[in-house]
Image (cartoon, rainbow, N blue to C red):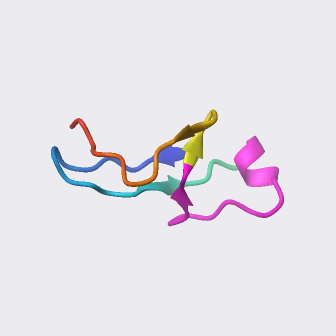
Amino acid sequence: MVQREGWSGFELPVQVSKVVPHTPADRCTPRVCEGDEVLMINGRDVHGRVTSR
């Protein structure tokens, strides 16, 4: 998976921009798709997170 980067100071959802073939994200059920919103990463809530870039 690749995280789509946002602009500084905006609350943007963390979204999947690409699913790399033959990776766990490509093989999991339910499928991870481009445009899916990521809510948690390693148990940390990232929903509505303010970008730092």
**Where residue 9 sits: x, y (%)?**
16, 46
Residue pictured at 63% horizontal, 33% vertical: 42
Give residue 52's quadrant in the image: top left
Left or right, 51 with reference to 17: left
Q: Is residue 19 visible?
A: yes
Q: Is residue 36 magenta?
A: yes
**Figure check: 36 above or below 45:** below
Give residue 22's quadrant in the image: top right
**Figure check: 44 above or below 9:** above
Q: Is residue 47 magenta?
A: no
**Of 27 and 47, which appears nearest the observer?**
47
Residue pictured at 27% horizontal, 55% vertical: 11
**Where residue 18 sits: x, y (%)?**
53, 54
Left or right, 33 with reference to 49: right
**Where residue 53 sits: x, y (%)?**
21, 37
**Figure check: 48 above or below 50:** below
Residue pictured at 75% horizontal, 63% vertical: 31
Q: Which residues are magenta?
A: 23-39
Residue pictured at 50% horizontal, 66% vertical: 35
Looking at the rendering, in which quadrant would you find the N terminus? top right
**Of 26 and 11, which appears nearest the observer?**
11
**How would you classify the magenta stretch by its main secondary structure?**
loop
Q: Residue furthest left?
A: 9
Left or right, 43 with reference to 16: right
